[in-house]
């Protein structure tokens, strides 16, 4: 299970997806009507329910995918779904920071799902390599 490199990539993808709970992906600037004081509220998975749901699905699918190592076809499919979930998460983060609210800006936390996509892509490549290796060994028998 951990002997294969794609297990490490999937674990790193889950960790990077989990970073959205701690690192804000946007900042919303709120000011009171009668004062000049501006408060900056960080936007992360705790404050945005859509990002919370997508992030929890990403973490669950990455961690569950580690334990399906004997069924490579299912593992490839779940990894492809993980990549799509990461793209959906990044797209919604950009939408939430740029178009949904008026006074917001993008922060460094948007990099976490991008790293998760990269690690999931590396895991997909590793699963494909294992699949090719098994097919070549079956041919030699």
Image (cartoon, grey):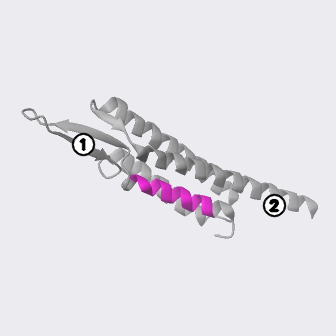
Is 13 magenta? The answer is: yes
Magenta part mainly helix, strand or loop?
Answer: helix
Position in image of residue 70 (x %, y %): 68, 65
In the image: residue 40, left or right of residue 87? left
Quadrant that contains the N terminus? bottom right
Q: x, y (%) of residue 42? A: 29, 46
Residue in the picture at 59% in, 64% down: 66
Q: Quadrant location of residue 126? A: bottom right
Q: Which one is in front, 72 or 54? A: 54
- In the picture, measured across the screen, residue 106 lies left or right of residue 39, that is right
Closer to the chain start, of discs 1 and 2, is 1
In this view of the protein, which residue sits in the foreground, 122 or 131? 122
Secondary structure beneath dot 1 equals: strand
Label 2 neighbour load within 10 Å: few <14, some 14-19, many 20+: few
* In this rendering, the label closer to the viewer, 1 or 2: 1
Whether residue 16 appears in magenta in the rendering, the answer is: yes
Residue ID at (54%, 62%): 64
The residue nearer to you, when weighing 48 against 53, is 48
Name the spot of residue 77 as percent of width and height, x first.
62, 50
Q: Residue at the far right: name it.
A: 140
Residue indicated by mark 1: 40
Q: Residue furthest front?
A: 36
Residue 115: assigned label: none
Q: Which residue is mark 2?
A: 134
Task: List x then y, in percent, for residue 44.
Answer: 34, 49
Distance between the Cα atoms at labels 1 and 2? Answer: 54 Å
Location of residue 12 (image quadrant): bottom right
Q: Which residues are magenta?
A: 8-20
């Amino acid at each position: 299970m951990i002997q294969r490199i794609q297990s490490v990539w999937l674990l790193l993808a889950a960790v990077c997806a989990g970073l959205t709970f701690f690192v804000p992906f946007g900042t919303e600037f709120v000011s009171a009507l009668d004062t000049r004081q501006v408060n900056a509220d960080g936007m992360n998975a705790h404050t945005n329910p859509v990002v919370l749901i997508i992030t929890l699905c990403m973490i669950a699918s990455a961690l569950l995918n580690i334990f399906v190592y004997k069924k490579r076809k299912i593992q490839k499919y779940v990894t492809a779904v993980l990549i799509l979930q990461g793209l959906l998460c990044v797209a919604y983060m950009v939408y939430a920071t740029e178009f949904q609210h008026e006074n917001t800006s993008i922060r460094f936390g948007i990099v976490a799902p991008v790293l998760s996509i990269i690690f999931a892509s590396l895991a997909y490549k590793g699963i494909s390599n294992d699949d090719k290796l098994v097919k070549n060994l079956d041919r030699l028998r």
